[in-house]
Amino acid sequence: MDLLALQARLKMGIESMFPDRVWVRAEISSISRRQNGHCYLELCQNESGTVAAKARAVIWASRWNYIDQYFRSVTGSSLDSGMEILARVQLGYHVVYGLTLTIDEVDPEFTLGANERQRQLTIERLTKEGLMNFQKQLRLPLLPYSLAVISAGNAAGYGDFCRHLLDNEYGFVFDVHLFEALMQGEGAPSSVMSAFSEILSANRHFDAILIMRGGGSELDLACFDDYDLAVTIARCPVPVFTAIGHEKDHHVADMVASAYVKTPTALADLFLDCYIAEDQRLGSYESRLHMAFANRLARMSSNLDILESRIHLASRGRLQDAEHRMDLLSVGIFRKAGERITASSHLLDRLSDRVQHAAGKQVDSASRHLDRIESKVRLGATSALSEAYSFLMKVETRIETTDPRNILRKGFVLALDRDGVKIGSASGSKVGDRVQMMFADGTLKCGVVEIDRRSNIPGEEDGNGSPIISGLGS
């Protein structure tokens, strides 16, 4: 039996075994919508964390719009990877492409029910592990100031939160830092957990961590029922507050958090209330202190009046005695001061004469020293200039001697190759090369027709390695 015959028998057997459509429960591992309108899926079933079964499926373009619209009208979301669905399929087998499931109906109520069942299992597991109340034991600081926010950067809820909190009418100041994360879909839990890791590893302390996300469909918000995300929130050493969804939504993330509210604005009010309560408490203290200080001041004022009259009587006698003693002291002070001023004047005159005499000597000595230095500098500069001038004359003579133009004027010839580069040896040339012979009055452009490699310098070897005995005239 050949392969085609085997495949044909498989096709016949499968289609005869399943002539009618059947309902199949599976998870969407991947989904792709093509330009022609057809939607291709890969369905799987996981057992104990491993893939136990897998099959390809297709929703033809003629059924896709109906299935998609109906599913979204019930769940609020389109079909996506990671969802568990109950689909009505027609089994088909192609001899080239193998088994294919053609989907013509999807039950959205099953998907919602599957998510709710998974949610209840997550709650039971967290309760058994004792993680539901970990966050409830943490205490928020009296005046929380530094807040870490996990949200999508462009989310309207985050914008409402910042405006309500930072532009508050009381003038309270907060330090808000945004850590962006995906807030819906299959990748949302891992993205939010990554934001937690970034917050806890930051080189600063945060008083609270806030997770906020506006309303959406049940499936959009199902990511906040994820077990791993709930464990991350429960075990976080910093108080976590959530504002996810609407009034009717209550997610596992809300249950394990320190506290939850329904909107980002309500979350801002929660932290503003901390400051308002403290402000009111301080205001009551201020009133009580004001009354206590007023009573104390009244009693002290009465005591001061009595003391003032006593001090006034006692000080009048003391002042009269002090004035008399001051008169006596001023007379003695004026006399002694006059004597000291006269003695100081004589001493200053003597010191002035000594300073002028010493300064004159120092100036004369410095003047003579500068004259000697000036003479040495003049002699040294003259000698250096003479030596420099002699050196320049020698250099100028060498330049004129080696100037190629002077060599040409004496009747010598300068050989250049076709690119104008000087030829320094016959060993690098070959017959047929183009050369230029530069004279003082012009240049000849020639070709090499023969090369004699014998040296033209007596005593040196020719091109064949034989010594030259005779001179140039031989």
Image (cartoon, helix red, strand yellow):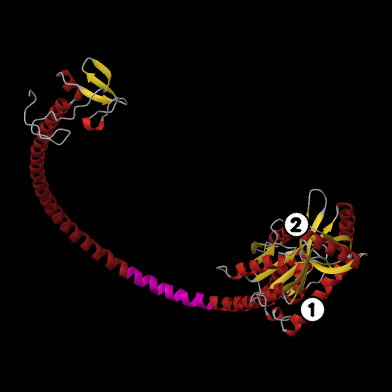
Tell me if residue 424 can be seen.
no
Relative placement, left or right, of 188 versus 341 is right
User: Considering only order in the chain, which callout, 1 or 2, is on the residue closer to the N terminus?
Assistant: 1
Residue 342 circle label: none
Q: Which residue is mark 1?
A: 121
Mark 2 lies on a secondary structure that is helix
Q: Quadrant of residue 72?
A: bottom right
Name which residue lies at 27% across and 68% down.
Answer: 332
| Looking at the image, residue 367 lies above or below residue 14 | above
Looking at the rendering, the stretch of residues picked out in magenta corresponds to 309-328
- Tell me which amino acid carries mark 1: Leu
| Looking at the image, residue 331 lies above or below residue 124 | above
Q: Crowding at label 2, few (<14), some or many (≥20) Cα neighbours within 10 Å?
A: few
- Viewer-nearest of labels 2 and 1? 1
Relative placement, left or right, of 470 versus 172 is left
- Tell me which amino acid carries mark 2: Ala
| Looking at the image, residue 390 lies above or below residue 408 | below
Is 92 contained in the magenta span?
Answer: no
Q: Which residue is mark 2?
A: 156
Task: Pick the quarter of the image with the N terminus.
Answer: bottom right
Residue extending furthest top? 441
